[in-house]
Image: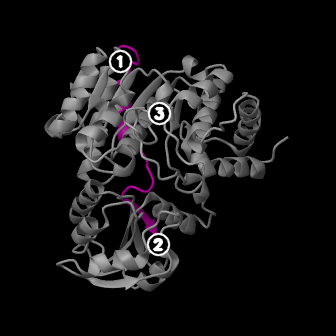
Amino acid sequence: MMSHAEAIAYLQALTQFGMRPGLGRMQRLAALAGHPEKELRFIHVAGTNGKGSTCAFLESIYRHAGLRVGLYTSPHLVHFSERIQINRVPISDIDLTEAVGRLSTLAQESGTDEPPTFFEFATLVALDYFQRQKVDLVVWETGLGGRLDATTIITPLACVITNIQFDHEKWLGQTLSEIAFEKAGIIKTEVPVLTASQEPEALEIIRQIAERANAPLTTLSTGELEAICPRDVPLLGQHQKLNAGLAVATTHCLMDLLPVADQAVLDGIHKTDWPGRMQYVHWGNGCELILDGAHNLAGVEAFIRAIQALDQRPTALVVGMLADKALEPMATILAGLAPEVFTVPVQNSRTALAGTLAGYFRNAPAAPAVHQCDSVTAALQKASKHRIIAVCGSLYLIGEVIGLVQQSKVEHGLNEWAKTRINSTT
């Protein structure tokens, strides 16, 4: 029998294979496991920003409607088990260990010398667990892109594309059209598609792909999303109201297949919880942290708008990013958010150096007092004189802070992928 430590070590070992786009390995793994995906119902969610929050809203709505709902998201903030949940209860150590032991043996006996990637195997574990637990519905988040993402082997009840913005350009392409092409790869024949994307060139690609698939397409404007969004959305920020509106629109689209009472929609939205997104946590001595995983330019702009809408704004900012992000423009607009900024490294091999990030802040037109720190722990200690501190950037950084608050070891080693460009002709 495999121990839990051995199961985590096995998952860790798979990260060395990085990201290898393509659906062939995932399809072979699913076949070896008896195609668990064919016994499940899915809502598949892709997009640049907001897909995790939209998944959280959808899960909460259907759970409050009385369904047993599987939730598959990535990356995790603290523990791997966060990725695979049923009714917001993470997979147990016992169930995870059993699944990894059984499925790793299956993968090794597959007769191929090409091992699965970490994300492919995690996706297989999720499919297997949800099928064995006989969930009523799975809310299914895309990992990266969509067209060649391991999650795309399923046929969902609906496809949801939150928005198309610049992020992961090294993998997905340098234009919004190229990125939209990858995200819209989740679209399936005659499966309804909903999107809140507002960018004309991205929308045109989504329309073309939906038309070729004979997939009914619903495009939702900001005004339409705001009109159907219930009041008192618990996740802060105007952008979360749009995510909530998109979730509600999806329930309307699927009402014949998945009936939901109006009260379940209201309760589901009002009681949604999604850590690391404008989340308040206590940090001792009366200090409060506002945590947000804003890690691309559009996300940072939404974060700033959310902060500016608060009655009490932070007077210090702790920020850490990955090196492959648009660091200079993000630092330029973040520089005016607080009078003191503390830059930190992220616990990831792709981290931007704290010194590099500090340099961008110092060169910003509205340059704050900038402090370069060796760790987020050191930054928070130095910033602790402030009553409200904002922490933003990579979700790896947010997970590290949550781990510090919870005094829990963060499994960041299970969040890696290699610097591989998705080949759009594959």
Relative vertical location of residue 208 with respect to residue 386 in this rendering, above or below? above
Residue ID for mark 2: 345
Query: Sequence-wise, which precedes: disc 3 or disc 1?
Result: 3
Relative vertical location of residue 66 with respect to residue 335 in this rendering, above or below? above
* Range of magenta residues: 256-283
Q: CA distance from mark 1 to mark 2?
A: 43 Å
Query: Tags 3 and 2 in contact by the CB under 8 Å rule?
Result: no
- Report helix, strand or loop for mark 2: loop
Locate the C terminus by quadrant. top left
Q: Position of residue 230 (x, y in %)?
A: 26, 38
Residue ID for mark 3: 140
Q: Mark 2 Cα within 10 Å, few/some/many (few <14, many 20+)?
A: many
Task: Please name the residue shown 51% across and 34% down the image.
Answer: 150
- Report helix, strand or loop for mark 3: strand
Query: Sequence-wise, which precedes: disc 1 or disc 2?
Result: 1
Q: Single out the mark in the foreground, 3 or 2.
A: 2
> Considering depth in this image, is 129 or 189 the residue closer to the camera?
189
- Asked if residue 231 shows in the view, the reply is no
Query: Sequence-wise, which precedes: disc 3 or disc 2?
Result: 3
Q: Any magenta on residue 258?
A: yes
Amino acid type of the residue that numbered disc 3 sits on in the rendered structure: Trp
Locate the N terminus by quadrant. top right
Query: Tags 3 and 1 in contact by the CB under 8 Å rule?
Result: no
Q: Mark 3 Cα within 10 Å, few/some/many (few <14, many 20+)?
A: many
Task: Please name the residue shown 66% across and 38% down the image.
Answer: 115
Residue ID for mark 1: 191
Q: CA distance from mark 3 to mark 2?
A: 31 Å
Amino acid type of the residue that numbered disc 1 sits on in the rendered structure: Val
